Image (cartoon, rainbow, N blue to C red):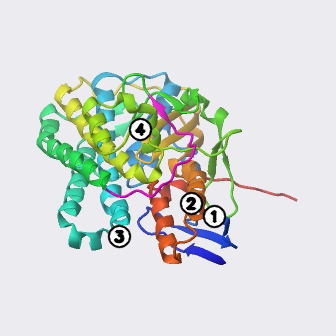
């Protein structure tokens, strides 16, 4: 028996991609996640621009996770300048990241992923039977957006982040005004963890290498070393020594691998597995009550892990707002100097790597960006292969549904993944 699973346009993902699976004589012979959205050349746009422009330019790469691009870029630039941002300015960086996780995870859990588990084509259809949960998801996302807007200047593509701090910092009373809404979001997030924990999860576990930041004292947003569950433990600046990207003929996005080891896994599942001990006890308890242990290897349960991270982000935002004291100055003075800097922060979808080379005038000579979706592509294809092999007896419609759900386990941001630039030039 032969069959082909072919989805020309993946639904409920950010960007444009396709899926192709070929099955011949009950053997899966080909699995391809095709990213056909055109390259966006952001690394090239950065060349020749001032180093201070990188946070604003890279924020335009993604409307869902612009804070991650800003944070990875400012950390890379500050490494070049020998600058360390601490105190309330550092707390505000964690706070705006809380907002991004709340709005991005809220969108994915409720609008993109939950319909898969409940048998609906989309959130609109789901709302007919579950209007309260859809309204709750929209409200959670709105609160995340409000937090980003308050700290970042606007909800989408924020404009208030700069190298060395912020252009403007909020007064304590401005942040305090969000407290009641964040407390509601925290309670709603706890309810969400319990709700998604009741879903049925298809069996799938592989021997993944989970890669994420790890900070000695905090669940990671934008500082720490890059670690894995297989003894990787490196400084952010050593990323390109251990990781590389490969061109693949059928997709416009590069595939990232660990040199000599292959595919790996970034995102909420990786953060959770590498940093469970750093979650507050109440968040750990919520995860356990939802059926998770300190180690979770079933990617279909990523919807629980994302919900746990919404709960954590609400708790962390409330902690920061409660302890916040307005700094004397919104940013540290900066003076350009030549050098190479590296930054990794934890975008909602996983580790986001930036590297910049600037000259002594602060002009960007070269830039490299490795987004989480390109890092997960090989692992997504590996999951698709296993799902197809384990479910050959399903009808074509059922297997197609399950394969699309498998892709959405990763909340892929396809638009983010296609901004590489590689030119092959031949001259006679």
Location of mark 4 (residue): 272
Tell me which numbered mark, 2 or 4, is placed earlier along the sequence. 4
Could you tell me if the residues under marks 2 and 1 are in contact, i.e. CB atoms within 8 Å? yes
Q: Is residue 20 left or right of residue 158?
A: right
Location of mark 1 (residue): 31
- What span is in magenta? 199-214
Query: Foreground residue, 265 or 94?
Result: 265
Give the main secondary structure, helix, strand or loop, of the magenta stretch.
loop
Tell me which numbered mark, 2 or 1, is placed earlier along the sequence. 1
Tell me which numbered mark, 4 or 3, is placed earlier along the sequence. 3
* Label 4 to label 3: alpha-carbon separation: 27 Å
Disc 3 vs disc 1: which is toward the camera? 3
Location of mark 2 (residue): 384
Query: Foreground residue, 77 or 17?
Result: 17
> With respect to residue 333, does 144 lie above or below?
below
* Label 3 to label 2: alpha-carbon separation: 19 Å
Q: Residues within 10 Å of mark 4 (few under 14, many from 20)?
A: many
Tell me which numbered mark, 3 or 2, is placed earlier along the sequence. 3
């Amino acid at each position: 028996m032969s069959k082909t699973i072919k989805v020309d346009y993946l639904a409920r993902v950010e960007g444009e991609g396709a899926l192709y699976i070929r099955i011949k004589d009950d053997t899966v012979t080909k699995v391809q996640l095709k990213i056909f959205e055109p390259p966006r050349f952001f690394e090239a746009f950065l060349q020749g621009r001032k180093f201070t422009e990188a946070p604003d330019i890279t924020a335009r790469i993604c409307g869902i996770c612009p804070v991650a691009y800003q944070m990875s870029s400012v950390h890379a630039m500050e490494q070049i300048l020998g600058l360390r941002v601490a105190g309330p300015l550092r707390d505000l960086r964690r706070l705006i990241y809380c907002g991004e996780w709340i709005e991005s995870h809220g969108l994915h859990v409720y609008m993109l992923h939950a319909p898969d588990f409940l048998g609906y084509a989309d959130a609109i259809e789901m709302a007919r039977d579950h209007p309260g949960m859809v309204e709750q998801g929209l409200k959670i996302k709105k609160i995340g957006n409000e937090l980003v807007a308050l700290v970042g200047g606007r909800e989408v593509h924020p404009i208030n982040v700069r190298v060395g701090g912020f252009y403007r910092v909020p007064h304590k009373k401005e942040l305090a005004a969000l407290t009641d809404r964040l407390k509601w979001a925290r309670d709603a997030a706890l309810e969400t963890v319990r709700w998604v924990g009741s879903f049925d999860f298809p069996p799938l576990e592989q021997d993944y290498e989970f890669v994420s930041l790890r900070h000695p004292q905090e669940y990671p947003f934008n500082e720490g070393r890059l670690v894995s569950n297989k003894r990787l433990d490196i400084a952010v600046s050593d990323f390109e020594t251990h990781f590389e990207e490969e061109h693949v003929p059928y997709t416009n996005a590069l595939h990232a691998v660990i040199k000599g080891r292959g595919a790996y896994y970034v995102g909420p599942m990786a953060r959770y597995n590498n940093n469970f001990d750093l979650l507050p006890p109440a968040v750990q308890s919520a995860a356990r009550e939802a059926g998770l242990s300190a180690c979770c290897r079933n990617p279909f349960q990523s919807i629980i892990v994302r919900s746990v991270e919404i709960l954590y982000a609400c708790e962390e935002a409330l902690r920061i707002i409660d302890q916040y004291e307005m700094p004397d100055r919104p940013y540290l003075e900066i003076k350009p100097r030549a050098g190479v800097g590296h930054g990794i922060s934890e975008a909602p979808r996983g580790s986001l790597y930036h590297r910049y080379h600037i000259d002594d005038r602060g002009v960007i000579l070269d830039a490299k960006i490795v987004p989480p979706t390109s890092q997960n592509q090989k692992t997504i294809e590996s999951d698709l292969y296993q799902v197809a092999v384990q479910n050959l007896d399903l009808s074509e419609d059922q297997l197609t549904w399950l394969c699309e759900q498998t892709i959405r386990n990763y909340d892929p941001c396809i638009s983010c993944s296609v901004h590489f630039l590689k030119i092959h030039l031949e001259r006679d």
